[in-house]
Image (cartoon, helix red, strand yellow):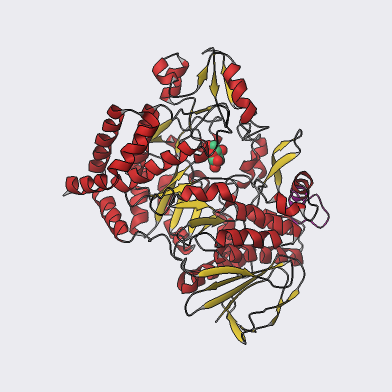
């Protein structure tokens, strides 16, 4: 039975897979090896996982509804180690979370880890976090509770401590060819002409000189993260084997890290090249052959026109899910400007995409907020890119008197004037400042803004992702300033330890934690149980007559939701063209008369009929 099923799945994709593989590698032997290894990983795949695969094959749209709520967390910050996370699943259930993204946990050198994104061994868990057995046990426990587990598959590079890198450093040609090695700077210099920088201040340049090896090596990210050379079929094959090994530990969602960068070509920006899509398409087919229950989540932090192609086409799909990154960045632009026009435009772009496309919606993640906004559109109002980024950064780092936000800059580049931004949702919403100043009115306002943003995020189709700690309004963590391994990377500002002491306060009526925790829980309950939040609903934005109030409609055959969000600190009146007589606000359960509606400062309505 097992073999038959594998054969069927392989047959379905064999010709296309072979075609694409040959296009890249023209190597029959390596393709043969790949296919026989796929079968090995299929045989090793556990019985429970195979059942999960079958069920999901029968219901391929299982992740496209309104019943998934994700949370991303660092294992050590949240519960010390994998075993600890397993013991805390009850808390996650209380949060109604049924999808957890475990931030990088594979073996990585201390002090040269990039938050775990520099993997030294794809088969080993960081010892302080546990073992592969612990991971398997955790995924098993999650599955029993109906939870999905996501992990990062860092495929663009390895740590310089990875076995391949060590051998390459010693001059072993076979391993050097798995990276990009150059004797002198002439080719690197040519690359530098067309390849932009990811970390312009914390890790400038795209190459690193290795004095002991007498070579330059390509390092798009940090100098200790060596870019893998996917022109070498050995690299592709071995990385696929690593992928399948990890999938077989019970992972449901593989976040393919920094995927646009994986193919390099001289005289190009080395981003989003067509071969990247060939590789992602092959990975999708490989998943469908060996582990059809596993989803690919692409990390494509780019402008919308670059993101959508990673879904592939209906006949040739690539990623199952992608991040709604421009919407996220535009949200914070709207917070800082109290102007939703650009956000409305951005939502219109996303809403016009096919409903099959599943986005992960989020307010914050572990990375910085990069200001990838539509500057051409902003220019019609005379808003220039450099000055606007400066305004956003100044506002969100609390430089203006009316600014409530407490963020920090990230990779501030004095030459270009460019900088990105860090900070937790609560701190950016003003909770930190108001609590520090013991200003109750400001605190109430900040909590409202935070809840409004969550309501708005949950209004969008797709999978909402909560950043662990946001559900209790966790503030920035400044201790990284004193940690020599971390102080240069301000993303640690919003990667603090989970405050279980504060989580306890969610039981205290009226506390910030209780207001946020219960507020978000209420929203999520409504979202899960109201069909109009399903991805099959039509979604569009409406004019509200006020540039601070965003209006979104979700509608299916029988239900309609008019969602309104006030991004300003003033009460507003909006006039709805949709002048149905009366609605129920699902959030408060109260009746609201249509047409002229008063929406309080930072208020959110889910008006339903
Ligand atoms: C991704 C991760 C980021 C990391 C980078 C390099 O963008 O989200 O945290 O620094 O990849 O692996």
Give the percent coordinates (x, y) of residue 562: 60, 75
Return the residue nearer the eye: 222 or 546.
Answer: 546
Main SS class of the magenta portion in the image: loop
Residue farthest along the left direction in this orientation = 1
Q: Is residue 21 left or right of residue 443?
A: left
Residue displayed at 32% across by 48% down: 288
Give the percent coordinates (x, y) of residue 238: 36, 31
- Relative height, residue 230 to residue 522 (above, below): above
* Count of numbered tags: 0
Which contiguous range is marked in magenta? 392-405
Residue displayed at 43% across by 52% down: 313
State the image quarter where residue 429 is shown.
Answer: bottom right
Q: Is residue 94 left or right of residue 383?
A: left
Q: Is residue 403 magenta?
A: yes
Q: Is residue 37 left or right of residue 489?
A: left
Query: In this rendering, does residue 154 appear at all?
Result: no
Q: Quadrant of the C terminus?
A: bottom right
Residue displayed at 76% across by 51% down: 379
Residue farthest along the right direction in this orientation = 401
Give the percent coordinates (x, y) of residue 182: 53, 17
Which corner quadrant of the figure contains ligand 1?
Answer: top right
Give the percent coordinates (x, y) of residue 508: 59, 67
- Relative height, residue 392 to residue 508 (above, below): above
Return the residue nearer the eye: 54 or 304.
Answer: 304
Query: In this rendering, does residue 158 appear at all?
Result: yes
- Relative height, residue 333 to residue 412 (above, below): below
Q: Is residue 492 magenta?
A: no
- Relative height, residue 551 to residue 229 (above, below): below
Return the residue nearer the eye: 462 or 601.
Answer: 462
């Amino acid at each position: 039975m097992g073999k038959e099923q594998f054969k069927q799945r392989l047959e379905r994709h064999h010709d296309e897979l072979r075609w694409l593989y040959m296009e890249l590698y023209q190597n029959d032997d390596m393709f043969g090896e790949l296919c026989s290894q796929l079968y090995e990983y299929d045989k090793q795949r556990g019985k429970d996982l195979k059942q999960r695969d079958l069920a999901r094959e029968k219901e391929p749209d299982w992740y496209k509804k309104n019943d998934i709520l994700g949370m991303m967390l660092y294992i050590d910050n949240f519960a010390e180690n994998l075993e600890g996370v397993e013991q805390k699943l009850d808390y996650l259930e209380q949060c109604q979370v049924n999808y957890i993204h475990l931030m990088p946990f594979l073996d990585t050198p201390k002090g040269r880890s990039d938050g775990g994104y520099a993997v030294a061994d794809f088969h080993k868990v960081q010892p302080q976090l546990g073992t592969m057995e612990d991971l398997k046990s955790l995924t098993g426990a999650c599955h029993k509770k109906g939870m999905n587990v996501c992990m990062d598959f860092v495929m663009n590079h390895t740590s310089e401590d990875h076995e391949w890198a060590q051998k390459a450093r010693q001059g072993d040609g076979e391993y050097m060819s798995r990276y990009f090695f150059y004797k002198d700077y002439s080719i690197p210099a040519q690359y530098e002409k067309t390849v932009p920088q990811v970390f312009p201040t914390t890790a400038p340049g795209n190459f690193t000189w290795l004095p002991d090896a007498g070579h330059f090596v390509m390092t798009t990210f940090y100098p200790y993260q060596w870019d893998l050379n996917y022109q070498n079929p050995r690299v592709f094959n071995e990385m696929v084997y690593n992928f399948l090994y990890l999938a077989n530990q019970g992972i449901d969602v593989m976040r393919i890290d920094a995927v646009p960068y994986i193919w390099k070509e001289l005289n190009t920006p080395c981003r989003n090249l067509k071969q990247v899509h060939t590789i992602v398409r092959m990975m999708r087919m490989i998943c469908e052959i060996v582990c059809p229950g596993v989803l690919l989540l692409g990390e494509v932090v780019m402008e919308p026109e670059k993101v959508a192609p990673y879904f592939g086409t209906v006949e040739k799909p690539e990623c199952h899910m992608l991040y709604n990154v421009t919407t996220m960045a535009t949200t914070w632009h709207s917070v800082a400007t109290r102007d939703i026009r650009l956000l409305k435009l951005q939502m219109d772009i996303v809403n016009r995409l096919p409903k099959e496309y599943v986005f992960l919606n989020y307010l914050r993640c572990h990375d910085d907020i990069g200001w990838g906004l539509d500057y051409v559109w902003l220019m019609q109002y005379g808003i220039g890119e450099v000055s606007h980024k400066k305004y956003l950064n100044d506002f969100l780092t609390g430089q203006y008197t009316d600014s409530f936000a407490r963020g920090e800059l990230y990779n501030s580049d004095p030459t270009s004037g460019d900088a990105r931004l860090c900070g937790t949702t609560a701190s950016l919403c003003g909770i930190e400042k108001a609590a520090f100043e013991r200003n109750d009115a400001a605190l109430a306002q900040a909590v409202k803004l935070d809840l409004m943003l969550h309501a708005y995020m949950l209004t969008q189709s797709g999978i909402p992702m909560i950043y662990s700690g946001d559900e209790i309004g966790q503030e920035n963590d400044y201790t990284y300033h004193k940690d020599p391994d971390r102080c240069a990377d301000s993303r640690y500002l919003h990667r603090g330890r989970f405050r279980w002491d504060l989580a306890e306060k969610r039981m205290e009526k009226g506390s910030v934690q209780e207001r946020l925790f219960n507020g978000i829980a209420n929203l999520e309950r409504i979202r899960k149980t109201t069909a109009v939040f399903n991805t099959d609903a039509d979604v569009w934005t409406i004019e509200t007559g006020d540039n601070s109030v965003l209006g979104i409609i979700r509608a299916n055959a029988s239900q309609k939701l008019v969602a309104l969000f006030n991004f300003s600190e003033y009460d507003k009146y909006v006039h709805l063209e949709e002048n149905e007589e009366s609605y129920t606000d699902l959030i408060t359960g109260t009746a609201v008369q249509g047409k002229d509606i008063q929406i309080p400062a930072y208020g959110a309505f889910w008006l339903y009929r």
